[in-house]
């Protein structure tokens, strides 16, 4: 089979569309696109493709099918290593496959009817006296890694969504000049700030008393689904350090959802003893 670049690029287009359909929860459509994409891709990007198919299957609630694609990704990686142990791509693909392995192992340990996942995550609790949590969002006019107005408003609205469901939280939007004293800082990620395959990152900082004192959030722009990404990072910033093993929760590691699930809320309640 000779390599046809045009055909390959068509495959890439189908693959990207499949991911969009997956994130839109159109699973059957997504799978038909993944399969069509496969025919055009000449096995050149099998590992990311199987990874995305495993995510789609897990998201649809089909753990068996997710494991099947996870195994395919592992097998392709082993083959790549056997053919050329010095292949440059291995160092990027290994973490992808490892993260999938971790997720699949988590999933097999949990019960599907659980109403929370508080035992699966670390608890990062804001002390009451730090309320209201002031949120500073970098703005494009004064920061290289700032957001435009509609993105900043979306970011603040994501925190408000959590407050609506978890009413003990109090938040306030920090003034432009108050970056240093704000409790939560949100900026765009620069090159190299994030782990590969990740759209956002939240870091927790503690004061000398061991209290949670500040949280920094970095998000990658343009993001295919900023609303979901920022709502998820806000969940981390407010106390959930880790991920839900359930794909129907916003705090699932790759969630495309734009709503906070009851299980997410129950988990936050347990963390705060509410
Ligand atoms: Zn996360």
Image (tube, grey):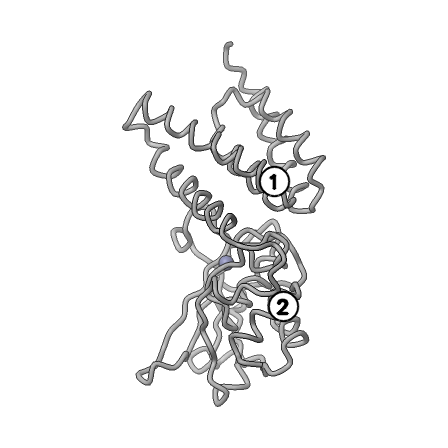
Residue 271, given in percent of the width and then of the height, sits at 51, 75
Q: Secondary structure at mark 1?
A: helix
Asked if residue 78 is positioned above or below residue 17 in the image, the reply reads: above
Residue under pointer 2: 158
Where on the picture, by quarter, is residue 229? bottom right
For the residues marked 1 and 2, what is the alpha-carbon distance in whole angstroms? 27 Å
Q: Secondary structure at mark 2?
A: helix
Q: Nearer the viewer, residue 206 or 185?
A: 206
Residue at x 40%, y 55% (from the top left corner): 193
User: Which residue is at the far bottom?
Assistant: 129
- Describe residue 214's horizontal placement relative to residue 226 as left or right: left
Front position among marks 1 and 2: 1
Quarter of the image with the C terminus is bottom right
The 10 Å Cα crowd at callout 1, few under 14, some 14 to 19, many 20 or more, is many
Q: Nearer the viewer, residue 218 or 258?
A: 258
Quick check: marks 1 and 2 in contact, CB under 8 Å?
A: no
Q: Nearer the viewer, residue 47 or 149?
A: 47
- Describe residue 116's horizontal placement relative to residue 197 as left or right: right
Residue at x 59%, y 83% (from the top left corner): 170
Q: Is mark 1 within 8 Å of ligand 1?
A: no
Residue 141, given in percent of the width and then of the height, sits at 54, 67
User: Which residue is at the far top?
Assistant: 1
Q: Nearer the viewer, residue 16 or 257?
A: 257
Closer to the N terminus: mark 1 or mark 2?
1
Where on the picture, by quarter, is residue 258? bottom right
Q: What number of labels is visible?
A: 2
Residue under pointer 1: 57
Mark seen at residue 184: none
Residue 205, given in percent of the width and then of the height, sits at 38, 73
> Would residue 123 be seen by someone viewing this image from the given angle?
yes
User: Which residue is at the far left?
Assistant: 86
Asked if residue 164 is positioned above or below residue 225 in the image, the reply reads: below
């Amino acid at each position: 089979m000779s390599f046809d670049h045009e055909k390959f690029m068509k495959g890439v287009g189908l693959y990207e569309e499949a991911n969009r359909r997956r994130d839109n929860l159109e699973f059957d459509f997504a799978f038909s696109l993944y399969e069509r994409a496969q025919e055009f891709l000449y096995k050149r990007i099998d590992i990311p493709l199987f990874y995305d198919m495993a995510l789609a299957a897990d998201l649809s609630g089909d753990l068996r099918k997710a494991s099947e694609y996870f195994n395919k990704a592992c097998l392709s990686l082993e083959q790549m290593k056997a053919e050329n142990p010095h292949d440059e791509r291995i160092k990027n693909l290994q973490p992808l496959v490892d993260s999938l392995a971790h997720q699949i192992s988590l999933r097999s340990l949990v019960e599907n009817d659980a109403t929370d996942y508080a035992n699966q995550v670390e608890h990062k609790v804001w002390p009451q006296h730090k309320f209201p949590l002031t949120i500073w969002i970098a703005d494009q006019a004064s920061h290289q890694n700032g957001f435009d107005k509609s993105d900043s408003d979306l970011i603040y609205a994501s925190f408000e969504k959590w407050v609506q469901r978890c009413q003990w939280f109090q938040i306030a939007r920090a003034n432009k000049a108050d970056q240093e004293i704000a409790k939560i800082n949100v900026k765009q990620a620069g090159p190299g700030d994030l782990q590969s395959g990740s759209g956002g990152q939240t870091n927790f900082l503690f004061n000398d008393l061991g209290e949670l004192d500040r949280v920094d959030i970095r998000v990658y722009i343009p993001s295919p689904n900023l609303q979901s990404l920022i709502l998820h990072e806000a969940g981390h910033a407010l106390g959930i350090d880790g991920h839900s093993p359930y794909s129907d929760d916003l705090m699932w590691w790759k969630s495309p959802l734009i709503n906070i699930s009851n299980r997410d809320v129950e988990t936050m309640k347990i963390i705060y003893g509410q």
